[in-house]
Amino acid sequence: MKKFLFLLSSGAGRGKSIRYIRDIRHVFTSCGMQDMLEVRLTEHENHVIELAREFSCEQGENGVVYACGGDGSLGEAASAVLGTGCALGVIPLGTGNDFAKSVLPTLDAKKLFAATPNPQIRPIDIIALRMNAEEKPSAYCINVMSFGFDTLILAKTYALQEKFPFLGGMSYFGGVGVSLFSNKSFLTRVGFTRGDGSVVEYEDDFILSALCNGGYYGNGFYPAPMAEVDDGVLHLLLAKSMSTAQILPLIIKYRKGTVAGDPRVRMESVVSGFFEGVNKPIVGNYDGTIFETQRIDFEILPRSLPFAFLDV
């Protein structure tokens, strides 16, 4: 039988964590699988990576790690289990639960907990990222990597969440409002290889770019409704620089999943490529982790990560 590791953040609050742990243990005890269960609270930075790596290396194909949190925790766990044969699953308990919207039938944690002993394991794609032409991947991205205006929003959102934690997901809208008055033009050289093998390379001023494995990010923005996490391609969105007045209608489309029809937006299905800042470094994010680099190369790793899908 498989063994299961649940990773929960101690930052969720002691009361919530105790309730979640009680729910998980009740589910596994009810089906006689309590000996197959391990639940751990993450206590410090990189603890998700440490715990997931230790468990996945020990259990291999016999293990399932459930990241109970948001996209950031899930991305960290993905980088830890990749290549071990261990499966990864998600229970959406974070502020941003966007990848879960692409892979789960519901975001109701209690219903999902009930299904966790019997996951359907299928491989999904993941993105390998290399900063500044490094030979080996610097990081892995399970959901979306992007740069430009949306990363400005994310940085402002994090600042608001830290100052006003009670805002929760609403802090994203505050981040949008504050960012409207920031620089919104990023001169970038971009190159990519399409799924058919053709290559494109050019330079332009972009307001944002998003490289999507999943369809959602940024607490509900929906740039790639066509995205499937196991289709072997990434969906690249490139939006040209525009005025503040033009941005607001674009944001509405970006949230509704209709931005692909906008004439200022280019959509491509790609398997690899790069972004390079022309006159200053790129400031971007992958799975919510903000980074700065002069150049970033990306490549899809098709069906390389076993994933625990849940039937509710």
Image (tube, helix red, strand yellow):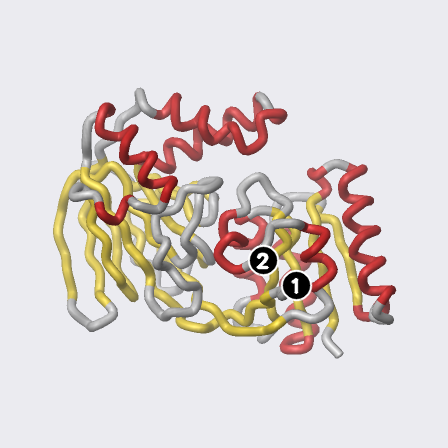
Q: Which mark is residue 77?
A: 2
Q: Residue at x 22, y 65 (%)?
A: 193
Which corner quadrant of the image does residue 195 belong to?
A: bottom left
Residue 1 % position (x, y): 75, 79
Marks 2 and 1, the one that precedes in the sequence: 1
Tell me whether the residue at label 2 lies in contact with that at label 1, contact meaning CB atoms closer than 8 angstroms: yes
Q: Amino acid at mark 2?
A: Ala
125 lies left or right of 169: left
Q: Is residue 218 above or below residue 108?
A: above
Q: Amino acid at mark 1?
A: Val
Q: Quadrant of the C terminus?
A: bottom right
Q: Residue at x 63, y 66 (%)?
A: 311
Which corner quadrant of the image does residue 50 belong to?
A: bottom right
CA separation, marks 2 and 1? 8 Å
Front-most of residues 76 and 105? 105
Neighbour tally class for label 1: few under 14, some 14-19, many 20 plus, Cα within 10 Å: many
Residue corresponding to mark 1:
65
